[in-house]
Amino acid sequence: MKEFLEVISEEMKNAFEKAGYDRELGRVSVSNRPDLCEYQCNGAMAGAKKYKVAPIEIAKKVSEMLQGSEVFESAEAVMPGFLNLVLKPSFVSSYVSKMAGADKYGLDTPSDKKTVIVDYGGPNVAKALHVGHLRSAVIGEAVKRLFAFCGYNAIGDIHMGDWGLQMGLVITELKERKPDLPYFDESYTGEYPKEAPVTIAELGELYPTASSKSKEDPAYKEKAMEATLRLQSGDRGYRALWKSIMEISVGNMKGIYDSLDVHFELWKGESDVQDIIPEMIDYLKKNDYMHLSEGAWVIDVKKDTDTKEMPPCIVIKSDGASLYNTTDLATIMDREKKYAPVKMVYLTDKRQDLYFEQVFRAARKSGLVRDDVDLVHIGFGTVNGKDGHAFKTREGGVMRLEQLVSDINDMTYERIMESRQMSEDEAKSIANIVALAAIKYGDLSNQPAKDYIFDMDKFTSFEGDTGPYILYTIVRIKSILSRLQSDGFDVENAVVSGCYEPTQKSLMMQLSGFSAMIRSACEEIAPNRICTFIYETANTFNRFYHEVKIATEDDKAKKESYTGLLKLTKDILETCIAILGFAAPDKM
Ligand code: ARG
C-alpha cells in the first residue's frame, strides 16, 4: 500500500502538472505550523526560479486545480507562495480503513526474503552479566524483530565470548582450588563427571578473583595464558572442563535472557570458528592480504582519506595466538558461507567503534564478504546513574543484570499495589510485564549512540514518556472495548467508516504514518523512532478519548467508526511494542 504522504503528494503533483508545472514540485510535508494547517507544500517557491514568476502566482494556480479534490478540503495559497493544506476527513478515514484491512497495516515488504544477521548480546562465559549487557540485548532484540517485521529473514546470534583468556583464568583458579579434579590429571583416560565441578555462584566469583590475581602476579598470569593455549590446542581434560563450564554458564544466561524476553536463533561463540581459522589464515596468506609486521600477521586497513588514526588489523599475534579480531573475521567468513546475508549488524558499546571499523575494512579488502554486503556496527552509549556516572549498586559495585531486573520488578510491584486493587499474586505477575516495558522503553526511547540515565522512578512512572504509560494506554483501550462488548455492542465487526471529530481525525492522521515510520526506523536501524511514534499515538489517542464519548454515543455509525479506530489503535500499538520486545497486560 502506498504510504500516506505519498498518496497526498501524488494528488499535489497532479495539480502542479495540470497547472503546467513540473510535477516533481508537488512534494508535500507535514506542516511546521500546525496552528494553520495539517500539511504543506513549498513547491511553488522552488518553481518560481525555474518559471520566472512570483511563487504566489504558481501557488494560486495550483490551488485552483485542487478545487473539488478528494484529498484536500482546502489548499490555500498564502504569501510568499506556500500551499497550506487541510485534508478531507473522508479521505483520511478511507485511507485508515484500508490500512486496517491490509497486511501489516499497509507496510510493503519485499517478496523475496533476504537474510540479515544481528550479532547482539555478546556475553562472556564465566563472567556475570552486568548492566552494560542490557543495551546490547534490548536494542539488538528490537532491531532483529524490526527487520523480521519488514520482511527479512532475521537471524540473531549471541556471539558469546567463550574462548579467550577469561576461560584460561577460570581454569587456573579452579585448578588452584581443586587440583584433584580428573580434568587436571593428564594420565586420566576415563569418562569425565557429568556434574559440573562448580556451581554458578562459585563461577561468578572465580573469574573476578582470578582476574585480580593475574593483574598482581605475573606468574599467575603466565599460568592462565598457558591454560588458555592448552584449552585452545585441544587438551582432552581442559576441553571437557570447558564444556562443563559452558553448560552451566549458558543455562544461567538462557534464564536471564528469557526473563528479558530476548531470544537468539544462534547460540554461537568465538569457539565455534576455531576449526575454520587455519583455512582463513591460509587464504589470507596465499592471496597476500596480510603481511608480517613486528612478528605479527596484519592486514593494512588505512585509507588515504582517513583523518583519524587507523592501525592495521592484527590477525595473528607474534606468539602465534589468534585473538578477538581473528574470530570476528572467521565468523564473517562463516556467516557469508552459511547464510549469504545482505547485512550483518553488530551491537556493542561504542568503545568498540574503531575495532569494528578495522575488522570490516579487513573483511572487505580481503574479500571475506561480497562487496555489497552491508556491515554495520551500532555503537551504543553508557547506562548511567542519576549522578551521571556509570550505573552502580547502592554500595558502589557493578550492577548485575539480574539484580537490576529484580529491583525494577519490586518497584513496579509497589506502584501497582499503591494505586490498584488486586491480589498480590496478580500484582506480581503484572509487575513483571510492566517492569520489562519500563526497562526496555527507558533504553529504546533514546538514540542508541547516546548515554542515558537509568532512572527507575521515571521509568516506572505511569505518566510521561515511559513504557508503563504506553501500556496503560493499551490497557485503557482494552477495557473500553470489553465494556462495549459486554454492553452488547458488536465490537468484532466494527470498522473505521467515517471521520466526525477533530481529535478523531488527528488520531487517524497519526496512525496513517505507521508504514513510513517503520520503514525509516528499519532503514536507519533506529528503534527509538518507534518509541516516538507510540508516545505520540498514545497522546493523540488520550485526547480523543477525553473529548469523544464513545460508549454513550447514540449514532450507530459514529459509534462503530470510533470502535474500529480503537481497535486499530490498540493493534498498532501492540504491534509496535512487540517489535520493541515487550507486551501489555490485560489490566494494570
Ligand atoms: N563479548 C564481546 C564483549 O564483551 C562482545 C561481542 C560482540 N560481538 C562480536 N562479534 N564481536 O565485548
Image (spheres, rainbow, N blue to C red):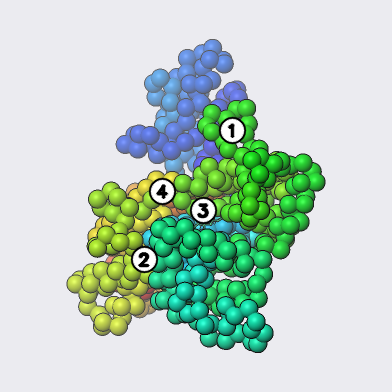
| Residue at mark 1 | 14
Residue type (three-letter) at the residue carrying disc 1? Asn
Task: Identify residue type, mark 3.
Answer: Leu
Q: Residue at x 62, y 34 (%)?
A: 302
Residue 512 in view, yes or no: no
Percent from the top left, x then y, of residue 47?
A: 54, 20
Answer yes or no: do the residues labelled 2 and 1 have beta carbons within 8 Å?
no
Give the alpha-carbon distance from disc 2 to disc 1, as whole Å. 59 Å
Report the residue marked by disc 4.
Answer: 381
Quick one: label 3, few (<14), some, or many (20+) residues within 10 Å? many
Q: Element type at marker 2?
A: loop
Whichever of labels 2 and 1 marks the residue nearer the N terminus, that label is 1
Q: Which numbered disc, 1 or 3, marks the residue closer to the eye? A: 3
What secondary structure is marked by label 1? helix
> For residue 155, which numbered disc appears in the image?
none
Q: Compute the Cα span from label 2 to label 4.
A: 18 Å
Q: Quadrant of residue 303?
A: top right
| Residue at image coords 74%, 57% | 278
Q: To which residue does mark 3 refer?
A: 347
